[in-house]
Amino acid sequence: MNWAWVFLSSLALVYSNYFGWAILACLALHFALRLRRDHSLSWRPLAGVAVLLLVSYLPLLSAFLDVLHSGICTSRPTLATFFIGIYNLNCIFVSESVAPWFWFLGVPAGIAITVCLILTFLRSPAQARPFLIYFASLLILMTVLGIVGTKRTLMIAPWLILPIGVTLGTLRRGVTRRALLASLIVIAIIGWYGIFSRTLYAAPRWVEPWQSVARDAATVVRQGGVVIGNNPSFFFYLTYALPPDDSARSSGFSGLLPASVRHRNVFDPQQWILAGHPQGPTTLLVKGLHYSAVSPATEDAQQSLDQHCILQDVQQMAHDPGAKWKQRYVPDAGQIEWRVEVRTYACP
């Protein structure tokens, strides 16, 4: 074994992701178990790599400890924690294209996932089964610590794919192999159906119509109106739909509205409040999720406009059928029933 490459790859892992330490702990445990069976191996290289890793990690140690102190959430109710873990396991297999609360597809997907996991655990070769256990342990750890999410489970997914693939490839033809293969086919069909239908997403942010909303908002601004928004995706599209005030910048990309580049009639809620509540003949308040939570400044801006202007129209788009489940089990996530809301005001 080339221990120099083990050290360098391990260092890259922990420098790029704090959770890499948990992955290395599983690998160290796996090597220790091999030591008990294979006496030709030595623990000294492993110990040396561990010491070098700890010394090399000292520059990031303070930041790592801060994350352990402030970035972990263990206060959620047990039932909520359980459902969050199940949801993320479902996303690993099916993806976010089909939410588990769409029962007509969620139930078959859940059954297929259960069959796949049970058969893999029972029939996988002895060399592959530990990785399934490591995957389950890391998923449980993420869930308990409150850091689980689809972007993080992607990092440990190979330890799920490996035992499934090895089991499928080593099983002899028979009922068990056909059942495992059938479960994977059902999961794939459900996932791809959700991708093409675009109506069953667990996270409707994939289908939020920000491009068309930004196009309509740009028309309002060109006519002298004022636009207030709180969603980064909305400002991304609005930046391209609406040139900045400084024409010298139009020759290249200089940033996004409303911070890096400015337009006199485009604000985020905090900018609009600090600017003294400017109004136009038409004022739009474009509401979405601001980094996964509704910002207090947005609610303050809406309250001010409701008091001083006439509400002409309210458009609600991108309905989230799972909002009630998210609000019930993850109330701190700030999920709302309608992902996009455009309020049109006439201000005297």
Image (tube, helix red, strand yellow):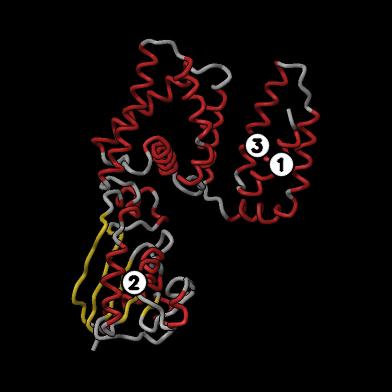
In the depicted view, which residue is nearer to us: 219 or 117?
Answer: 219
In the depicted view, which residue is nearer to us: 63 or 283?
Answer: 283
Task: Give the residue pinned by disc 3.
Answer: 24
Asked whether the residues under the numbered discs 3 and 1 touch, taking CB atoms below 8 Å apart as contact, a structural biologist would say: no
Which of pointers 2 and 1 indicates the residue nearer the eye? Answer: 2
The tag earlier along the polypeptide, 3 or 1, is 1
The tag earlier along the polypeptide, 2 or 1, is 1
Task: Give the residue pinned by disc 1.
Answer: 8
Which disc is residue 241 wearing?
2
In what element is the residue under mark 3? helix
- Tell me which residue sits at (38%, 29%) in the image: 113
Instruction: Decide: is 184 above or below 60.
Output: above
Q: Quadrant of residue 277?
A: bottom left
In the depicted view, which residue is nearer to us: 284 or 304?
Answer: 284
In the rendering, at what x and y percent does residue 81 appear? 44, 42
Which of pointers 3 and 1 indicates the residue nearer the eye? Answer: 1
